[in-house]
């Protein structure tokens, strides 16, 4: 799905709605940065999905120091609810890892 902001509804709202549908078995997320506030926004929906046996796989970039330790820990804290894998990506070549894939 292509998502156009600011013309569409808030992306986080739509993402939560899609997570809550339960029509998936594995959710992959690849983002440039993670912060605790952003993960907290998704955590209730992700927790419910993980408790239903869904899997969460996350790749987070750490370029430009925008990812916080608390953001990574927030994703890792979801492991107590189900299958979660979190990978950190850093590009040594100098280019910024900047995806927004869900």
Image: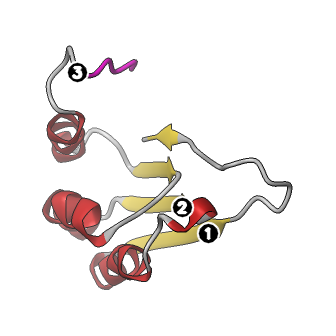
Q: Earlier in the sequence, mark 2 or mark 1?
A: 2
Query: What is the secondary structure assignment of the residue under circle 1?
Result: strand
Q: Which residue is mark 1?
A: 88
Residue 65, position in %: x, y? 54, 68
Residue 68 is situated, as x and y percent measured from the top left of the image, at 43, 75
Which residue is drawn at the image coordinates 28% and 22% (left, top)?
5
Q: Within 10 Å of the Cα at label 3, are there few (<14), some (14-19), or many (20+) other Cα atoms? A: few
Q: Which residue is mark 3?
A: 6
The mark tally for this picture is 3
Horizontal relation, residue 18 to residue 91: left or right: left
Colour setup of the view:
secondary structure
Question: Helix, strand, or loop for circle 3?
Answer: loop
Q: Decide: marks 2, 1 in contact (CB < 8 A)? A: yes
Q: Say which residue appears at 22% left-offset and 37% top-offset.
A: 18
Is 64 magenta? The answer is no
Of circles 1 and 3, which is in front? 3
Q: CB atoms at circles 2 and 3 under 8 Å apart? A: no
In the picture of the structure, the residue carrying the numbered disc 2 is 60
CA–CA distance in space, label 2 to label 3: 24 Å
Q: Is any part of residue 75 visible from this angle?
A: yes
Q: From where the camera sits, is residue 49 visible?
A: no
Query: Image check: 99 left or right of 13?
Result: right
- Which quarter of the image is occupied by the N terminus? top left
């Amino acid at each position: 799905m292509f998502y156009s902001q600011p013309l569409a509804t808030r992306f986080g709202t739509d993402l939560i709605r899609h997570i809550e549908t339960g029509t998936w078995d594995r959710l992959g997320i690849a983002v440039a940065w993670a912060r605790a506030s952003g993960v907290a926004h998704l955590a209730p929906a992700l927790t419910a999905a993980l408790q239903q046996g869904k899997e969460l796989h996350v790749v987070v970039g750490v370029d430009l120091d925008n990812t916080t330790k608390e953001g990574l820990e927030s994703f890792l804290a979801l492991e107590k609810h189900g299958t979660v894998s979190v990978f950190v990506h850093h590009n040594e070549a100098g280019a910024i890892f900047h995806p927004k894939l869900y």
